[in-house]
């Protein structure tokens, strides 16, 4: 694996003034070094993207399709290299990192396909009394330079969710990956260069979110910001973006209802996966389980038995289920939140202890209260709170008692109950007979409330990343 990357600006690799080290969160070993860009260097990337924007807008849909497909093919061929890079920089177990790469390939393929479907619509002009003799239609125009700011937890796939649709829509991009996980972002830029993407269409820079990110967001030559990350940074971006369109894919404290009549085996398998994948560092991580009154006790015991079997270890070890959080500070934060909950009456069913550098043992908590951080805030750690509900109405109300609303789940054999709940839960997506963590990359995806604004999934992101232009032809002067 290549370990030293330069800035990718205007199709060239540019030596930066300063660099920083990327560490493997699990053991602190150095994975590589990347640029710590200055605002001047980010300014160069924006100017390159601006200069290339007219050519990107003119590039045919077929050519956009072709380059995105080429990148998908190259990525598929190098799946293992990407997976090892993601596992090393993010601490994600290697088997989950491979899944991320295969998802990123799909995201690129769906983006390529959307490039061919980037059409407007005919407008029935004469349906209005004043519209006779007019022919109207819309075009989907690129917005121009799009700033794509991405988080650490899915460093490759979430970058593809922004870069893919942006290029499919004829835009140019300045991408700023998270400082903790920048290497897969630069590897992605390498693939685009190899696939023949013209210079300046994609520019990749790294550096501190506060300095470089703010500069990008506020820059007058950036026409749109697409951001995935925490609610706090998302709100700040919205505040400084001015009139620019902004899409925000933010955090959550997702919940699932496991009904008394649920398929318990299914529920256990999905809850174990949803609660602990990537040590809970997934935006649709299952944080809250509301179990039916008849099954709650047995379900909690059975979930404990599953969680006890997780193998904790090095991210590059094939057998590892749980490796580490992104850094020591987050491991300490999660352990503190658990300790605080326990001090206030919660019960640890299993786990919660810190081990090694940045690992927290998968934890299940019971007897929590709604205002505890482990329930009310986004834990972004390997912890699940199990609670018992008395009625479905109460369970839905409890799920809705959150400042977030990304995805939710209900596991029941009763479709009437499931649809009743799906209509009432306030969030961007409800998974029936599944946990909130289910996602395939083409579906519309995003949140309400503090979970964000706008939708991703290549078709939906493309809609956000293009502007509707209406064209009307006056036919009155033509042959009668
Ligand atoms: P984060 O701290 O908000 O950072 C996300 C990105 O924003 C990073 O590239 C970061 O750069 C940058 N940034 C930080 N401060 C900035 C500023 N002032 N202006 C502009 N950019 C700034 O989030 P994270 O810890 O990487 O990721 C975890 C969060 O992402 C969780 O809340 C999770 O739920 C959310 N998430 C949401 C989704 C979704 O689709 N809804 C998906 C995945 C993750 P630095 O790294 O340099 O600080």
Image: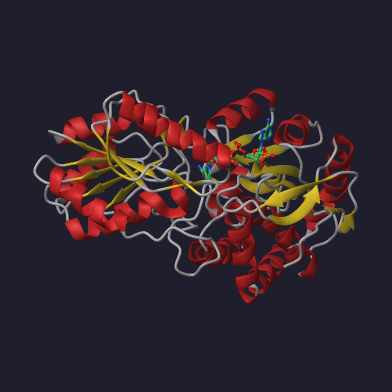
Q: Quadrant of residue 289?
A: top left
Residue drawn 23% across the image and 32% down it: 367
Please state the horizontal and vertical placement of residue 14, each as a whole percent of the image.
Answer: 90, 53
- Coloring applied to the structure: secondary structure
Residue at screen point 83% across, 61% down? 198
Residue 344, position as x, y percentages in the image: 30, 23
Q: Is residue 404 above or below residue 188?
A: above
- Among all residues in the image, which is located at the extreme left? 294
Residue drawn at x 18%, y 32% as measured from the top left: 393
Residue 447: image x %, image y %? 45, 38
In front: 214, or 66? Answer: 214
In the depicted view, which residue is nearer to us: 232 or 85?
A: 85
The quadrant of the rendering that contains the N terminus is: bottom right
Direction from residue 137 to residue 129 in the image, left or right: left
Q: Residue at x 66, y 46 (%)?
A: 180
Residue 281 position (above or below residue 192): above
Among all residues in the image, which is located at the extreme bottom?
77
Q: Is residue 229 visible?
A: no
377 is higher (above) or lower (below) than 286:
above
Answer yes or no: is residue 279 visible: yes
Query: Where in the image, quadrant-wise, is ligand 1 located?
Result: top right
């Amino acid at each position: 694996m290549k370990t030293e990357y330069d800035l990718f600006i205007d199709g060239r690799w540019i030596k930066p003034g300063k660099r920083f080290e990327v560490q493997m969160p699990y053991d602190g070993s150095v994975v590589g070094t990347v640029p710590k860009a200055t605002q001047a260097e980010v300014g160069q990337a924006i100017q390159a993207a601006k200069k290339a924007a007219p050519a990107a807008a003119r590039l045919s849909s077929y050519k956009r399709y072709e380059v995105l497909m080429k990148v998908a093919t190259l990525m598929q061929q190098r799946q293992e290299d990407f997976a090892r890079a993601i596992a090393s920089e993010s601490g994600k177990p290697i088997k989950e990192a491979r899944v991320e790469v295969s998802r990123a390939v799909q995201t690129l393929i769906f983006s390529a396909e959307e490039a061919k479907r980037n059409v407007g619509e005919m407008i029935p002009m004469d349906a209005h009394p004043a519209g006779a003799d007019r022919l109207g239609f819309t075009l989907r125009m690129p917005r121009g330079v799009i700033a794509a700011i991405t988080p650490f937890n899915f460093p490759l796939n979430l970058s593809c969710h922004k870069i893919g649709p942006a290029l499919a829509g004829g835009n140019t991009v300045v991408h700023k990956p998270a400082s903790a996980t920048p290497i897969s972002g630069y590897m992605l830029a390498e693939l685009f260069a190899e696939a023949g993407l013209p210079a300046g269409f994609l520019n990749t820079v790294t550096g501190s979110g506060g300095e470089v990110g703010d500069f990008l967001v506020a820059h007058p030559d950036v026409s749109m910001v697409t951001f995935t990350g925490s609610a706090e940074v998302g709100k700040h971006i919205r505040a400084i973006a001015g009139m620019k369109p902004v899409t925000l894919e933010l955090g959550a404290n997702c919940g699932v209802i496991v009904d008394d009549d649920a398929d318990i085996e299914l529920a256990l398998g999905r809850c174990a996966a949803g609660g602990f994948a990537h040590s809970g560092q997934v935006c649709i991580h299952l944080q809250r389980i509301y179990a039916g009154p008849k099954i709650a006790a047995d379900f909690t015991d059975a979930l404990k038995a599953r969680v006890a079997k997780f193998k904790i270890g090095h991210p590059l070890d094939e057998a590892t289920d749980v490796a580490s959080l992104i850094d020591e500070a987050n491991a300490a934060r999660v352990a503190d939140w658990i300790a605080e909950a326990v001090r206030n009456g919660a019960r640890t069913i299993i786990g919660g202890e810190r081990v090694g550098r940045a690992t927290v043992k998968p934890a299940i908590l019971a007897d929590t209260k709604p205002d505890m951080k482990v329930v009310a805030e986004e834990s972004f750690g390997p912890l699940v709170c199990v609670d018992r509900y008395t009625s479905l109405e109460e369970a839905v109300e409890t799920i809705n008692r959150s400042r977030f609303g990304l995805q939710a789940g209900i596991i029941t054999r009763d479709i009437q109950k499931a649809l009743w709940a799906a209509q009432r839960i306030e969030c961007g997506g409800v998974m029936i007979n599944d946990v909130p963590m289910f996602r395939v990359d083409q579906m519309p995806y995003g949140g309400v409330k503090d979970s964000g604004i706008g939708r991703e999934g290549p078709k939906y992101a493309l809609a956000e990343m293009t502007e509707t232009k209406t064209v009307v032809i006056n036919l009155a002067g033509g042959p009668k």
